[in-house]
Amino acid sequence: FAASRPPATRGRLGKILSLEDFEEAARRHLPRPIFGYIQGGTETDSSVRANRASFAAHAFVPRVLVDTGARSGATMLMGQACAQPFGISPMGASALAAYRGDMVLTEAARDAGIPMIVSGASLIRMEDLVAANPDAWFQAYLPGEEDRILPVVDRAAAAGFKTLVLTADTAVLPNRENNVRSGFSMPLKPTPRLAWDSAIRPRWLLGTFARTLMTHGMPHIENMDAVRGVPLVSRNFVRALGARDRLTWAHFAMMRRRWPGKIVVKGILAAEDARRAADEGADGIIVSNHGGRQLDFSVAPLQVLPEIVAAAGEMPVMLDGGVRRGTDVLKALALGAKFVWVGRPMIYAAAIGGQPGVAHAISLLAEEVRRGMALLGAPTLDDLGPHLLRPAV
Ligand code: FNR
């Protein structure tokens, strides 16, 4: 059976057999406040749990004696060839968890031939990231102010991004009590807890934090112009985010007119909003509850996926939130998603193993998808459909 294991099986990564293993390894590796920032949701964490539960609620009805020898997870997404039906979700401040985290994710995605969405809250310049991976997408966090939207849109276009993602589910900063309890804050405050937890995790302290300080200085926001260059420890950081609660479809329409490439809305959970996005000229949507990190008790994306797919017409519907297994990918695709995105496990993989760590995570998931297709009797992704699913008991 070892033959089907991915190549990175020596050393530390050899013990990592699944994406869940990366989470456990990261729990030991990262200072608690930083691990908590990544893992946590908001308030009661209800949506984080719902995301996982929504996948567990489906069971497969496999078909047998089907020739799946030529199976492949490769797919076309809005004109872009993707080696796998999954990509890497945008995650802000990745470079706190892994040395040059955003770059590690971007380069690993490039090498694996999968898309990666550069976060608007990245700590590395968008220009450097798209230079490393011309197929990367850019995700913007924008306030409802025209004079602050267009410069970001124009900058991303000039940098060479071909796909722009507007994250729509962050009208205000969420209530992440877990961060307060664990000593993590934005702006980042050097709390005693953070100092102590860092001191007892020297691999992170020296390998990520000290190394970042020595090579690039104190981390700062790079891709939101109003806060550009403002260190993460500065109070101005939050104030300068602007009035995101004033952002509307009218601003989206303005972006649509300005942006020359593909444009995607991320954070849709209502079928009506999916239809509106299509009407406003979106090229795709990502059904998402932000990994359970914004409105607590927001519905799991997988639960509303079928009604959204029905409302979206021809527009491709993507999904993220709680995807951890190849079977999760196959379930989402069977329920009508064109593509899925994976968040937290990729940042854990970057923290644990740098670029080879992310490559290992991608190949583990890719192998699970391929194995799942064979066992399910689905030679192509187009063979996936709701007929292969039943409610789990
Ligand atoms: C995020 N997410 C996110 N989304 C976004 O549009 N812009 C961003 O900058 C961030 N930042 C961010 C940081 C961290 C640490 C996490 C964990 C998440 C949400 C992310 O893109 C995605 O929607 C979820 O992470 C998907 O859920 P899973 O796969 O993490 O369960």
Image: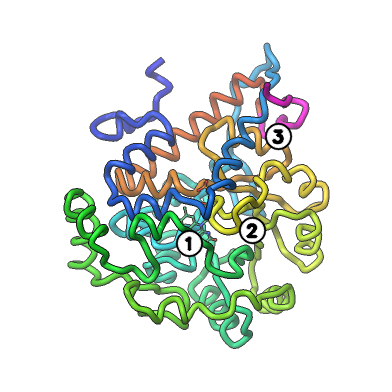
Instruction: Tell me which label, 3 or 2, sits earlier in the chain.
Output: 2
Mark 2 C-beta to ligand 1 under 8 Å: yes
Label 1: which residue? 118
Instruction: Tell me which label, 2 or 1, sits earlier in the chain.
Output: 1
Q: Is residue 211 above or below residue 306?
A: below
Give me the residue at 65% from left, 54% from top: 286
Give me the residue at 35% from left, 48% from top: 350
What residue type is disc 2 on?
Answer: Gly
- Horizontal arrangement in the rendering, residue 351 relative to residue 19 (left or right): left
Q: x and y percent of residue 161 in the render?
A: 53, 67
Q: Where, by quadrant of the figure, is residue 275 drawn? A: bottom right
Q: CA distance from mark 3 to mark 2?
A: 21 Å
Q: CA distance from mark 2 to mark 1?
A: 16 Å
Q: Is the residue marked by circle 1 packed among few (<14), some (14-19), or many (20+) residues within 10 Å? A: many
Q: Nearer the viewer, residue 205 or 347?
A: 205
| Badge 2 vs badge 1, beta-carbon distance below 8 Å | no
- Is label 2 in a helix, a strand or a loop? strand
Q: x and y percent of residue 20 in the render?
A: 43, 35
Label 3: which residue? 334
Q: CA distance from mark 3 to mark 1?
A: 27 Å
What residue type is disc 1 on?
Answer: Val
Q: Is residue 365 above or below residue 375?
A: below
Q: Nearer the viewer, residue 204 or 48?
A: 48
Instruction: Tell me which label, 3 or 1, sits earlier in the chain.
Output: 1
Q: Which residues are magenta?
A: 380-393
Q: Is the residue marked by circle 3 packed among few (<14), some (14-19), or many (20+) residues within 10 Å? A: many
Give me the residue at 39% from left, 73% from top: 221
- Horizontal arrangement in the rendering, residue 52 relative to residue 23 (left or right): right
- Is label 1 in a helix, a strand or a loop? strand
Label 2: which residue? 267
Q: Is residue 260 above or below residue 3?
A: below
